[in-house]
Image (tube, helix red, strand yellow):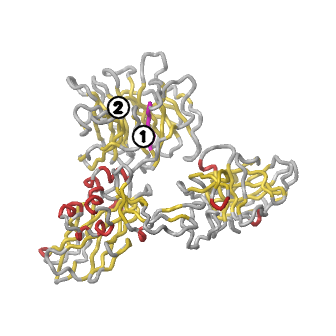
Amino acid sequence: MLAVAASACADGGLVIEVTPTDPMVDSVRLYLGGPDRTEGVTLDLPIGSGPNGVVHGQVTGVTSFPRDANNELDVQAVKAGGTAKFVLVRDGVTDLGAVVAVGFAGTEIREVATLFDVHLPATRFDQYSLTLAPPARPPVAWSDRSPVPASEATCIGITDPATKHPFSASYIVTPDDPDCDGLAGDDPAECNNAAWFGKRPASLEELTCLIGDAMQSSCYLGGPECIDGKPPMPGQCVPTHYCVPKAVCSACAGKLTCAQDITTNPTASILGFGFDCPLAIENGNACEDELVLTMGPIDGLNCTAALIGDATHPFADHIDLPEQSIYVKIDDGCRLRVQVKGKAPDSNTATIGLMVAVDLENGRGVAVPIVLKVDRASGQCTGTPKTCAFDAAALGPSLLDCATSWSPPMAVPGLVPAGVSNVRSPTVTRDGLELFFVADDTEVWRSIRSSRIDPWHAPERVLALGTQTGSGFKTTVARISPDGGTMYLASNRLPTMGGSDVFVARRTSLVWSPPAPLLDLNTQNDETGASVDGTESLLVFDRVLDDPISVRKLFLTTRAPGSTAPWPAGTQIPGTGPMANDLNPHITESGRNFYFASDSVGTAGLELFTLERTGNTFTVPRRIPGLSSPQDESDPWVSADQREIYFASNRTGAWRIYRATR
């Protein structure tokens, strides 16, 4: 809970002073937003032309919160030159996603000011001073008639004039119409409550087709699109976010019912794309032993939900057949559990065809067919789950590319210091608040920010880590440990064993120790690009192999978690090919996923690749789609949840740092 008090007499909270600049402002009203932002949601600002003659323009990644009695604080009168003071007492609520102060002249909105991601302390009162100002774009009050008094407004859109970040847009909305389009949330014509006159693809209950993309490299579950204010278009088919193995779509000729039960397809080869799972039988009944489909995280992304369906049943957590019921659930590590209850099919050759749809944490999903085959030889029920192979990688790269695609990369602004030509090797701490990079292959720089949604501040040089320009020495790669306490550098500074070696520096607070070489790891050949997992028990780096094939290859070395023992020399990781350079790797916190650059055959210069590790086994490296350009990409750094990637590219001529999300 959050209470409003007249004075700071409780244990902790906020004091917010709001000062208008417009002498016409006679009252100030404060609006509070919860801590959860809906990143990726789209709402609209009042620019451009829109439906019903309303003028609007699109903004993505906004904060929206209901306008109701528990959200809108009482208005405070204010005189010209005066200040309105609000005291918020912490009582259960620890964080606010947004605080919006609105200055009114009568019922007209004149000025606004916003705060984002505000913490309410428990034992003190933090004070904020907000100065109202006209927003970059005028706020509006949308309603059935215009203009209307602010007290009757359906929606107020606020833009923070101090920043252009997408989260600088906030919306104060009514509870029954969260996207301000005049359609109540339970209105049959309301398709997308998260976007003003928005669209959405078909739900899993509305699927009607399989559909390929324009490049014919992916395949999707599809169905009729829905647009606010319009019914679904009969016969129309647009893709959902569920990716399907391309070969299944080809064999089924775009027929959804075939994909949902591939046993009905007369083409025998289609069965190869189902996973043949044994269905144990005892006394004519299906054993209720669970079938564990060991899929594992897809490209490092965890699964969040699973549903099951067939040619005659929509996707749900279970389906009821004439003599069986089949259930699906999901647990940690993307393990799917399928359970059959009821009478077993009579024939020893009988099969049950199903399709499982799995949601991924990046908002996308995969849908794959499985085939349950009667196994009368099992003899009796054991109560022990039976494992059924379910390797998404075996379904082909197009499925993984579709399900794990990244957003178009954008250059990160503000990271090129004056006088610097190239910036490379981005590396970020676990909390996302510190970013280090290397400028012109010599100096290490550091940028900070207050929260993950804030822009990066102007960088400052870290003198203790770099090799000064003009010294003759280079520092080419910097990799910070996830906890921010250790920096691994690639440098030819002294003392080296020859060429570039891996150096390590540690810090207490912001004071770095002098970088020291990893003597047991370094050789007379070049070593660069060292990166560690979250426990600093795994270290990946690249090393130049001996002549006559002087190419860079990835190596992995291990030690006990928490150990400070020297790193062994390491063993080579299978890469993209014997003649290709694999370099500048990054290992994720889990130690499972590796990202690196390679110039393997078929690439346009250096491109980004990924592979996965399970024990001592590595998957075949896979090129990451959507991040490449005709020039070079290198130096990837990926967040622990693998939803954010920073990398370097010279696609515009000079090396710059880019960011993408998924």
Where is residue 620 drawn, in percent x and y?
26, 45
Magenta: main secondary structure: strand
- Magenta stretch contains residue 480: no
Find disc 2 in the rendering and name its residue: 605
27 vs 344: above or below: above
Picture quarter containing residue 304? bottom left
Which secondary structure, mark 2?
loop
The image's mark for residue 388 is none
Q: With respect to residue 136, does 542 lie above or below?
A: above
Res. 3 visible in picture:
no
In this view, 191 is above or below 507: below
List the residue tagged with mark 1.
637
Q: Position of residue 289 (x, y in %)?
A: 24, 74
Question: Which amino acid, mark 1?
Answer: Trp
Quick one: 154 or 518, which is closer to the camera?
Answer: 154
Find the magenta span and give its range. 645-650
**Local crowd size for mark 2, using a 10 Å CA cut-off: few (<14), some (14–19), many (≥20):** some
411 or 278: nearer the eye?
411
**Callout 1–callout 2 Cβ contact below 8 Å:** no
x%, y% of residue 615?
A: 26, 49
Near-viewer residue (410 or 534): 410
Which tag, 1 or 2, sits closer to the chain's start? 2
Can see residue 495? Answer: yes
In percent of the image, x 42 and y 40: which residue is there? 637
**Mark 2: amino acid:** Gly
User: Left or right: 253 with respect to 198?
Assistant: left
Based on the displayed image, in which of its 4 quarters is residue 528 positioned?
top left
Please provide percent x and percent y for residue 8: 75, 57
Marks 1 and 2, how far apart at CA = 19 Å
